[in-house]
Amino acid sequence: MAVRDILRMGDARLLRVAQPVPESMFDSDEMHELIADLLDTMKAASGAGIAAPQIDVDLRIVIFGGTGKNPRYPDAPDIPFTVLCNPVLEPLDDERSAGWEGCLSVPGLRGEVSRFEHLRYSGCDAAGVAFVRTVDGFHARVVQHEVDHLDGVLYPRRVEDMTKFGFTDVLFPALVA
Ligand code: NI
């Protein structure tokens, strides 16, 4: 259990397409230690979610939610704590919405990003048990942001209007960067 260093934008390791989690890793000590480290690291940085590649683990694993009221996203609804391995995303329609995002690998900045509003996602938990969820709004946004990390995409690449990209403390003086 440890707070790990978070790779920051500019590091080529954040641009990799991460590897699928092999069957042998589910429910292993290695998996449980990795999830504990991801959770410790996410909580220490007040993140809404974190992806394994952000701590230099080249696997298709993300975690998110479970943090209750988050000082970085005080108006966000609660999302249940989720471990999502080998995710598959399926937008349910064409509706998209614009919303502000930040990223632990892009500290101090926020940008407005368009995401699918209604989403079905599936994958496995840390034990390898498959599950599927249908979500919308902020929950859908967080999943799309985190899963982008598994494909080497950081949110600034998705900011369409660069006038909606800037420093958190300038854009939102009341918020924590
Ligand atoms: Ni991120």
Image (tube, helix red, strand yellow):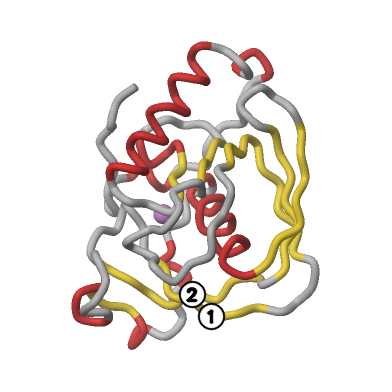
- Along the line of sight, the residue nearer the viewer: 152 or 31: 31
Q: Residue at x 36, y 84 (%)?
A: 164
**What's the amino acid at mark 1?**
Ala
Disc 1 residue crowd, few under 14, some 14–19, many 20+, Cα 10 Å: some
Q: Kindly state the secondary structure of the residue where label 1 is placed.
A: strand
Residue 172 x, y percent position in the rendering: 27, 79
Residue 47 vs 170, above or below: the answer is above
Q: Which residue is mark 2?
A: 113
Residue 43 vs 106, above or below: the answer is above
Residue 125 x, y percent position in the rendering: 65, 31
Residue 2 figure quarter? top left
Residue 136 vs 107, above or below: the answer is below
Are the residues flagged by discs 2 and 1 in contact, CB closer than 8 Å?
yes
- Along the line of sight, the residue nearer the viewer: 12 or 105: 105
Q: Kindly state the secondary structure of the residue where label 2 is placed.
A: strand
Q: Quadrant of ligand 1?
A: bottom left
- Along the line of sight, the residue nearer the viewer: 11 or 46: 46
Quarter of the image with the C terminus in it: bottom left
Q: Which residue is mark 1?
A: 98
Residue 156 visible to an observer of this rendering:
no
N-term mark: 2 or 1: 1
- 111 left or right of 19? left
Disc 2 residue crowd, few under 14, some 14–19, many 20+, Cα 10 Å: many
